[in-house]
Image (cartoon, helix red, strand yellow):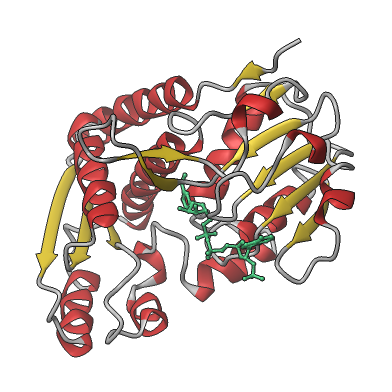
Amino acid sequence: MSAQIIDGFEIARQERERVARETALLKEKGITPCLAVILVGENPASVSYVTGKEKALAEVGMKDKSIRLPESTTEQELLKIIDELNNDKSVHGILVQLPLPKHIDEEKVIMAISPEKDVDGFHPVSVGNMMIGKKSYLPCTPHGVLVLLKTMNIETNGKHAVIVGRSNIVGKPLAILLARKEANSTVTICHTGTKDIASFTKQADILIAAVGRPNTITADMVKPGATVIDVGVNRIPDDTKKSGFRLVGDVDFDSVKEVASFITPVPRGVGPMTIAMLMHNTLEAALNTLEEK
Ligand code: NAP
């Protein structure tokens, strides 16, 4: 029997609807959540991500302070803008779209964002708080994956989660979140140094691919009945599309759906959840200022 498709698009829509309701209540108290989105350069994927975020902000009734900067922007200029936003009380969250041009040190930029406004959850203070289970902004993509599992009533407690990929924005935070007591999974992380990846993926009750390479996970690597979450977003050439490309994940969807019990598609799987969780974090940031009053 074919796997049940996890409709990330619909689950994200419901999440944004909830955020919109809570935003409306907050506005009645005189606070409109505001996110500053900074884009440096014109990387087509980044432009499309930023446009999606701006659209979502408008849809949930939040303010969007978009800052689009030329590729030639210096590190110092960018740090100065972040400093101004850190001190601007009308701005609740700051997001710098990654990757940045090569001449700008991403780590320095992430460190410059005030942890109180770090709605991406990439600042070491946010990461540290998440690690020790203290309140923090959770990174949007891993958080979105947890919400998908929860919404679909997929048990994580006592399950073996295998994550392929160990980036700071997806693989590692997901591993931490799934291993925390609330999710209570046993976690294995695979990467390019892992020998015989299939021997691990075949043990997974929950298999998560965050690699950035199409067809990394094939049906023979999946335990029958597993839940498969595909975080990957890869552009592959497609002459039949106006854009000249189409999006695929890291999982060979057609073959794996015949083995798994649940699977996320690409697109309309994890991607929309990332934006929905960003809206959630921006709302949290605005609510935090209410607590400070
Ligand atoms: P990344 O920083 O490039 O990390 C990729 C990870 O995969 C690395 O840890 C790498 O291992 C590992 N890897 C690469 N090739 C491998 C292989 N053949 N076997 C095993 N491991 C391998 O990527 P990322 O930022 O985590 O993103 C991963 C994918 O998710 C990309 O397609 C990205 O576009 C997508 N993504 C989607 C969303 C969303 O909202 N849906 C959000 C973020 C990212 P090493 O550490 O050993 O190099």
**Residue 131 position (above or below residue 78):** above
Q: Please tell me which residue is depicted at 76% across the width and 38% down the height of the picture.
A: 206
Depth check: give the residue in front, 178 or 230.
Answer: 230
Q: Please tell me which residue is depicted at 41% across the width and 58% down the height of the picture.
A: 120
Q: Is residue 104 left or right of residue 175?
A: left
Quadrant location, the N terminus = top right
Q: Please tell me which residue is depicted at 16% across the width and 57% down the height of the picture.
A: 90
Depth check: give the residue in front, 116 or 242.
Answer: 242
Determine the image quadrant of residue 132.
bottom right
**Residue 203 position (above or below residue 100):** above
Determine the image quadrant of residue 99.
bottom left
**Image position, residue 167 (x, y; %):** 58, 65
Residue lying farthest top? 1
Q: Is residue 23 left or right of residue 274?
A: left
Residue lying farthest front? 239
**Image position, residue 272 (x, y; %):** 41, 35
**Image position, residue 254 (x, y; %):** 62, 25
